[in-house]
Amino acid sequence: MAEEDNNGAAEALPPPPPVPSDFTPSKAEAEPTKKKAPRLPMARRGFGSKGQKIPILTNHFKVNVSKNDGHFFHYSVALYYEDGRPVDSKGIGRKVLDRVHDTYDTELAGKEFAYDGEKSLFTVGALPRNKLEFTVVLEEVTSNRNNGNCSPGSPNEGDKKRLRRPYRSKTYKVEISFAAKIPMNAIANALRGQESENSQEALRVLDIILRQHAAKQGCLLVRQSFFHNDPKNFASVGGGVLGCRGFHSSFRTTQGGLSLNIDTSTTMIIQPGPVVDFLIANQNAKDPFSLDWAKAKRMLKNLRVTTSPTNQEYKISGLSEKSCREQTFTLKQKSKDDDGEFQSTEVTVYDYFVNQRNIDLRYSADLPCINVGKPKRPTYFPIELCSLVSLQRYTKSLTNFQRASLVEKSRQKPQERMQVLSNALKINNYDAEPLLNSCGISINNNFTQIEGRVLPAPKLKVGNGEDFFPRNGRWNFNNKKLVEPAKIERWAVVNFSARCDIRGLVRDLMKCGEMKGISVEAPFDVFEENPQFRRAPPVVRVEKMFEDVQSKLPGAPKFLLCLLPERKNCDVYGPWKRKNLADHGIVTQCMSPTRVNDQYLTNCLLKINAKLGGLNSMLTVEHSPSLPLVSKAPTIIIGMDVSHGSPGQTDVPSIAAVVSSRQWPLISRYRASVRTQSAKVEMIDNLFKRVSDTQDDGIMRELLLDFYVSSGKRKPDQIIIFRDGVSESQFNQVLNIELDQIIEACKFLDEKWSPKFTVIVAQKNHHTKFFQPGSPDNVQPGTIIDSKVCHPKNNDFYLCAHAGMIGTTRPTHYHVLYDEVGFSADELQELVHSLSYVYQKSTTAVSVVAPICYAHLAATQLGQWMKFEDTSETSSSHGGGGPNAGPAPVPQLPRLEEKVSSSMFFC
């Protein structure tokens, strides 16, 4: 009311005096800059104390920093060829700077430097001058420049030029210029919780020193990991691809001081050795004569080979059009009269190597040659003289078979992993690294001992009012009923040509269901696929099956059981799910009846029950509602994840999935909302999407309305968000972009509504591991760590909720970025632990909270829908086609049909 009075008073005043024209703009622009301060990750409020205390070892190695007063000096590096062109080729930088280091020691005042292989170089203390220029000459191992349309070894113009210089050398100019200085005490400040740009840069310098140390030993470097060229570390995963085991290392600031985190790491490399052997393995061919050469050409492009007998190294630019015995080139030779003239003759590659070079060729004559020349000036080698160089990364996505093989071969039990890591520290011998010494840094060789706590498992409720405690993170439904069994009625079976005894399967399913408390009616019918469609495209097979079902059933079924012929990745899966869920709103469960036993049927029934709206088990505390804070006020729990296409697929849209709890005070029931967004974009951009002044078409509105309807017309007072898949560098975006959108979505629904938020990020791909001292087993489920190796200031903790059965347990690293709800450390850790026990698909605790698992499942399943989309129409017809049309719009996913939109279809 007071405002209105003021306005009334304002109207009574005379008009304001005229404002000078040049003054207005600055005033107008100054207003909006009063932006609210960005949200920052919160500081830790305290430590948890619940649970049984236990000693734990971790793969963090203590780093002592004895020097605190100097500076790192950062210099920019620019490389040029002799004629002033900038050097474009990757990988030459280290060789050039090693040469600078060896040749110009006095000009560099004897200083060691750390070089990142690209444009940055760091020293401890300053170099003599702010700008230094050097010229170095490198003998080229891989020269294929000015080596025209001829085979190596034949004298031509290029060779004449070269003879004046020692063996194929090249001159480089190097400019090193001062860029910045970084105080070393920034590291000490970070350890006190005062992080800054400087402290991140200073740690980056230390990481670069370790990378350079590894590069000098001939390792392949991949981000923070390095891989030695040692066949003992290679394991074939099929298709000419090897898993190569190496190490990850990074410096971390922790509450216990600076530590070096070392872990094993695996990357994929191309099988080194003869090119033909690789191609045969890659294409699973029986011999070189049955290879697909178009495929081979794509596969080989840009790989490096050495050629025998000279052992020169080259990069493959392609394959010859013709076979070795037909492919010709122009050979220039000195004429017999010795008058300095050259005569040119056309010879085949085969003749040249066999007759002029006297090299015996066994099988290359009828195969294409390898071309290592430039586009206009090819240089050919017979394929059998070429061998692939070791440690070349394979960056394409792996097949399911390769992935399974890789997982199996890279498993390590806890004690084996500890042994390998201890050895790594010895091999690396960091004490001998001169730069680390000049920074005053020494690295302890022992695993750091810390204190962990084991939280007790939460009590679970099943049918008939029975409660029980899971043991070792696991339980089963033997002799137990489900807490809320659904009814399987009005259903049918469809069979896409899987071979099995369907009547026996249905009988077993009904019997198994009865024991769990699920009433399973007899199915209406079994629909067998018409054999003539077995080879048809997946979408056609699904259409035909649906026509059959619709023509014979009296009405829409409530549930369809679908039998697939292959265990994994059946092409029919995506189109089938889409047809049922988006077009018809029918709940469906796919199964592959190859190995059906009681356990398999029980697992299927758990999924079917959850999809049909039942509940398998729940936390006793959500039944009696007594969860700290969550049961006191309406609370929605959100899980968010984005899944991206495989590496190398740039045109596949990313898929954002957000799941939300429903029917408060429950935290075991969820539904999902899924949208596509631009490829490789990690931030979810559809949380709030204003279409008009009254319409928001975003994800959050859908979820909030569902919560309201399913929770007895209550709006949530508390919104707890679990976000997966973001790195520390993106925390601020989660807090300031995504959270802002969610708040906007709430305000759009009701201007006066201000719920409290808690935002937690879960990370799985980090490299901290935990071990039980003196035990071969993994840490117990429920092990939580929130001290010593955690962040000096921020609110984070590690939790191993699940029982690690194979390999070494990977803890989940939870970062509490924001908490308006006001949880104590124990309350929040207990909530996260409890949410690992509500995953309806399994009878085990899961390694990351269920809402995140569900978001991941929903994104993956809808990704399968996209696979068989004809995206061409969406991208070309709306894209405008012209060069300035901007990026093509992202094809939209069909929405779930209303009957299943709030179901747990993703289970």
Image: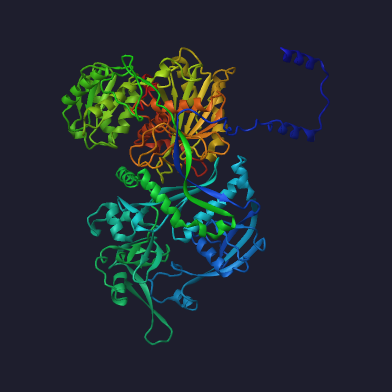
Can residue 585 be seen in this snapshot?
A: no
On the picture, is 379 further left or further right than 553? right
**Count of marks overlaid on the render:** 0
Can residue 727 be seen in this snapshot?
A: yes
Quadrant holding the N terminus = top right
x 74%, y 34%: residue: 25
Residue 865 in which image quadrant: top left
Q: Is residue 471 above or below residue 227?
A: above
Q: Is residue 800 above or below residue 492?
A: below
x 48%, y 12%: residue: 713
x 22%, y 34%: residue: 565
Q: Is residue 243 above or below residue 216?
A: above
Residue 572 coordinates in the image, percent (x, y): 28, 33
Residue 696 coordinates in the image, percent (x, y): 52, 23
Out of 646 and 621, give the one closest to the viewer. Answer: 621
Residue 601 in which image quadrant: top left
Residue 884 coordinates in the image, percent (x, y): 52, 43
Quadrant holding the C terminus = top left
Out of 272 and 397, give the one closest to the viewer. Answer: 272
Out of 887 and 756, give the one closest to the viewer. Answer: 756
On the picture, is 710 further left or further right than 299? right
Out of 237 and 425, give the one closest to the viewer. Answer: 425
Residue 271 in which image quadrant: bottom left
On the picture, is 816 further left or further right than 659? right
Which coloring applies here? rainbow
Residue 170 coordinates in the image, percent (x, y): 51, 70
